[in-house]
Image: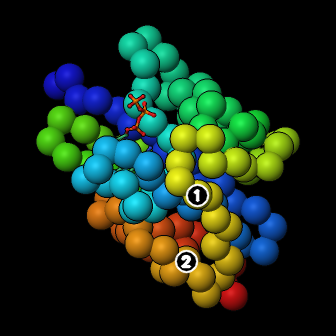
Amino acid sequence: MNEVVVVAAVIVAPGGRVLAAQRAEPPALAGGWEFPGGKVEPGEDETAALVRECREELGVEIAVGARVGDDWPLSAGYVMRVWLCTLVSGTPQAREHLAVRWLGPGEYYDVEWLGADLPVMKTVEGLLPPD
Ligand SMILES: Nc1nc2c([nH]c(=O)n2[C@H]2C[C@H](O)[C@@H](COP(=O)(O)OP(=O)(O)OP(=O)(O)O)O2)c(=O)[nH]1
């Protein structure tokens, strides 16, 4: 099956903070919040794509950790794969998003997550230390 793989990074910082990014486009998704990432290019390693996307979109270097769940459904023909990540260097900037925001424990649902990302956030919450 030739599905498009979208990779996404749940960047976790000390204190259980999680980075959320607000999409700028397309119009149907603009304003919604997601985990940074993007499409894997042909022949590209998935975690290499994740590192590349975070560099391009946020201006940061990340280390990729454990996978979160299995394949997360997006629209037809697309699937999302998600990893826990940590920051190695840099401060996340909204280079391609409308905004980026750290969400601490108790704030994880303060943004309007895209439909595909809400269940990811719920799973991640169960993996992080409680408030
Ligand atoms: N990156 C990302 N995309 C998501 C998430 N949730 C979700 O539904 N999507 C959708 C939005 C897009 O239709 C698709 C990813 O496309 P993208 O625009 O981020 O990919 P890209 O950076 O490679 O973009 P492009 O240059 O090819 O337009 O997956 C998410 O958490 N992260």
Compared to residue 93, the image places residue 4 above or below, namely above
User: Which quarter of the rendering shows the C terminus?
Assistant: bottom right
Residue furthest top in the image: 43
- Type of amino acid at the residue the image marks with label 1: Ala
Q: Mark 1 highlights which residue?
A: 99
Q: Residue 26, can we see it? A: yes
In the rendered structure, find residue 108 and report the number of the disc placed on it. Answer: 2
Residue 54 percent coordinates (x, y): 63, 38
Q: Could you say which quadrant of the image residue 32 lies in?
A: bottom left
Q: Residue at x 53, y 54 (%)?
A: 98
The quadrant where residue 107 appears: bottom right
Taking the image in four quarters, ligand 1 sits in the one at: top left
In the drawing, does residue 79 fall left or right of residue 21?
left
> At 67% from the left edge and 67% from the top edge, which residue is drawn?
102
How far across and how far down the image is residue 48, in percent?
59, 25
Quarter of the image for residue 95 reads top right
